[in-house]
Image: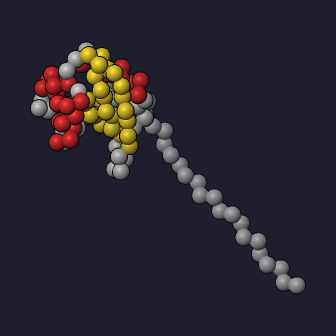
Amino acid sequence: MVNKPIAKKVVAKTFTRPLPHVSEGNILLYPITTERAIAMIELENKLVFVVAPNATKPQIKKEVERLFKVKVGAVNTKITVKGLKQAYVRLKEGKADDIAAALKIV
């Protein structure tokens, strides 16, 4: 009888560095200015921003309300294929057109 070596299971170790703490002022990175985003501003009263990857919806809502002095109705987020986190911010009170004009988007 021949002794066969037993294959050991190799577990790859991944080292990730912790994400920097998200604080007031570094949540919203920049607004999206595509044709689709402009249509959302005009038709749905929504603004689209690229945000910090570890920002939460309540943090995004609070930051938009603080910066632009408006009431936010809802925040939806998605991670793009490129790894960017986008936030779709629907305004409850206030006009997205006015904010877009202040940001020089429209």
Q: Nearer the viewer, residue 66 or 87?
A: 87
In which quadrant of the rendered image does the N terminus lie? Answer: bottom right
- In the picture as drawn, the residue positioned furthest to the right comes out as 1
- Colour scheme of the picture: secondary structure
Quarter-of-image position of residue 8: bottom right
> In this image, 53 relative to 9: left or right?
left
Q: Position of residue 24 (x, y in %)?
A: 36, 22
Q: Residue at x 38, y 40 (%)?
A: 78
Q: Position of residue 10 (x, y in %)?
A: 65, 62
Q: Position of residue 53 (x, y in %)?
A: 39, 38
Tell me, yes or no, if residue 52 can be seen here: no
Q: Nearer the viewer, residue 3 or 62?
A: 62
In which quadrant of the rendered image does the C terminus lie? Answer: top left
Tell me, yes or no, if residue 58 can be seen here: yes
| Whether residue 9 is situated above or below residue 56 in the rendered picture | below
Q: Nearer the viewer, residue 60 or 88?
A: 88
Quarter-of-image position of residue 47: top left
Give the total of numbered labels.
Answer: 0
- In the picture as drawn, the residue positioned furthest to the bottom comes out as 1
Q: Residue at x 20, y 25 (%)?
A: 96
Q: Position of residue 43 (x, y in %)?
A: 19, 31
> In this image, 56 relative to 86: left or right?
right
Q: Residue at x 77, y 75 (%)?
A: 5
